[in-house]
Image: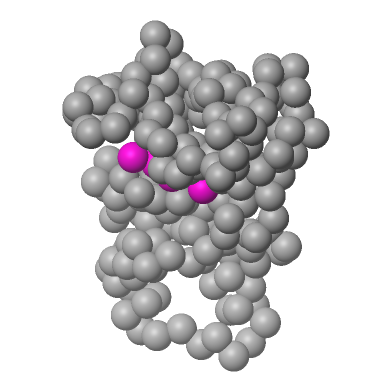
Amino acid sequence: MKNFVQLRFTKAASIILLSILGSSSLFAQGLDLENTESRAGYSIGVNIGLNLASQGILGDDVNNAALMQGIRDAIEDSIQLSDEEIIAALEQYSLLMEQRAQEQLADMAIAGESFLNENAMQPGVVTTSSGLQYLVLEEGPNANAPMPLATDEVEVHYHGTMIDGSVFDSSVDRGEPISFPLDGVIPGWTEGLQLMKVGDKYRFFIPSELAYGAAGAGPIPPYSTLIFDVELLGIN
């Protein structure tokens, strides 16, 4: 129940579920949700629907009317396909989803590469031999301030976004700078911060191979090009 409570009932999910339930005879007749049994059944159904929607299972790739009929048939023990046919259908669907996922990853990589190619032409943007791009946003007041080595621990403020501008992490938004060993972060940060003096503020454009690559990380999808505004506050 705790996991269910934590699920987000998004607008998209609600539209999908309403479109499915709209064709249900139970929905057309109206549900009595004033008793424990009805509330439990409804809540289980919503939980299932939310999980299906969050996994991207509902939508254009699945006939929603057939999905609802399959649920009814399973409950009523009147399944219309053999076990072998069901397994084959699920395997075909799995292959289709894997193909779609690979296409999306390829699109992500192409979008990142295209962005970096165009960004390299912008005034002030410097591209290093590794492919890292940076832009000096603000130079610190002390021209003789120290620069970190890869073996140092640094303190920074940062604001991280995808190339579409969506924020995935920000110490600035949290109001709490962070400290970390410079050799313990993504290669783009390890390289980029060594270009900075204490007090400087740079914007890094980090290709996926210098970030999280094919694995991704948390809210960051695989093959994502990342943008960070980083202020070097100190070397510990």
Horizontal side of residue 118 vs 183, given as left or right: left
Look at 34% across and 19% down and name the residue there.
127
Where is residue 99 shown, x and y percent of the image? 31, 22
Closer to the camera in the image, 63 or 186: 186
Closer to the camera in the image, 221 or 181: 181
Look at 48% across and 40% down and name the residue there.
139
Main structural element of the magenta stretch: helix, strand or loop? Answer: strand
Where is residue 192 shown, x and y percent of the image? 52, 25
In the image, residue 228 sits, relative to residue 39, either above or below, namely above
Is residue 208 magenta-colored? no
Closer to the camera in the image, 125 or 170: 125
Where is residue 58 shown, x and y percent of the image? 36, 49
Q: Is residue 82 visible?
A: no
In the image, residue 123 sits, relative to residue 59, either above or below, namely above
Farthest right residue? 236
Horizontal side of residue 47 vs 29, given as left or right: right
Look at 56% across and 51% down and name the residue there.
170
Q: Is residue 162 visible?
A: yes
Q: Which residues are magenta?
A: 159-163
